[in-house]
Image (cartoon, rainbow, N blue to C red):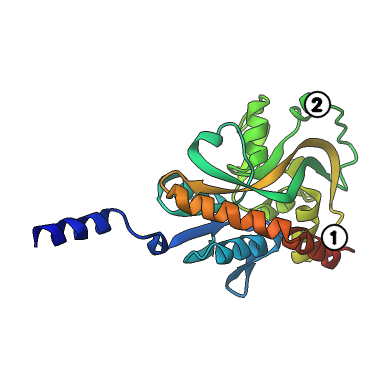
Amino acid sequence: MRFLLLVLGFLLLFPAPGSCASLRVVTEEWPPYNYAENGAAAGLVTAVVRAALDRAGLDYTIKVLPWARAYSLALHDPNVLLYSTLKLPEREPHFHWVRLDGLGVEMHLFRPRHRRDIRIGTLDDAKAYRVGLTRDSAPHHFLLRQGFQEGVNLFPVSDELLNVRKSEPGNNRIDLTTGDPLSQGYRLRQAGLPADYWVRVLPLFSTDIYMAFSLATPPETVERVRAALRQLRDEGFIDATRDGYLRRLAP
């Protein structure tokens, strides 16, 4: 009996590989990469993430949340996966990172098309203007590192489309915003606004897209997903999914 109790205790402490806790997957509204559609997560990166988690044989749920809330969950709770994430120096120690090969973005500063008075040649020039951007986003952290200051030339919001309203003629509460061209055009079309409302004025940085697992997520779970992604990449699934979305989004 004592031996059986010891065995039972060992099994409870070290569950079998197939008995991993359910993974909570969280993302934000960043179309066309990830967004909510008819109550479910959708988008280019969502399709790749779902395929990888299914291939890895994991039990999971996906929720679309405000970015700050999703980020906080991944930062503090176990068994949480956050996507689409950009790997920044200040974020790097706080997560297990898995790169999505073949998926990346280029971030830019944009001005409203009607603001032809704005002239920017360097990032220092932009410090003379008011930049609206999503709170705790990669551009937010990037510009803070470059010496921008909240309340002076940075004005974070919770929803990117608020920056359109704040920049419209007659409102004029911000001068610039940040983002990637594909997502900006997509958001504007979704909102029934001209797809060319924002005009690129300065590149900020380019980077790959990542999945970020909370540090308390079992390493085995992370490695299973990493291996599944390698298989999907080698089979051409990621490239085919990306190219299919880009064809559908072409004007």
Q: Amino acid at mark 2?
A: Asp
Which dot marks residue 125?
Answer: 2
Pick the front one: 205 or 163: 205
Q: Residue at x 65, y 53 (%)?
A: 230
Q: Is residue 82 shown above or below 97?
A: below
Please tell me whether mark 2 sits on a helix, a strand or a loop. Answer: helix
Q: Are marks 2 and 1 in contact (CB under 8 Å)?
A: no
Q: Which residue shows up at 62% across the image and 42% down it?
A: 156
**Left or right: where 136 falls relative to 32:** left
Q: Which mark is residue 92?
A: none
- Which residue is at 84% across, 53% downward? 197
Q: Residues within 10 Å of mark 1 (few under 14, many from 20)?
A: few
Q: Quadrant of residue 14?
A: bottom left
With respect to residue 205, does 29 lie above or below? below
Q: Residue furthest bottom?
A: 38
Q: Amino acid at mark 1?
A: Pro
Quadrant of the snapshot with the N terminus:
bottom left
Q: On the picture, is 175 further left or further right than 56?
A: right
| Residue 194: image tag | 1
Point out the image quarter for the C terminus.
bottom right
Picture coordinates of residue 150, whole percent (x, y) = 60, 33
Image quadrant of residue 42?
Answer: bottom right
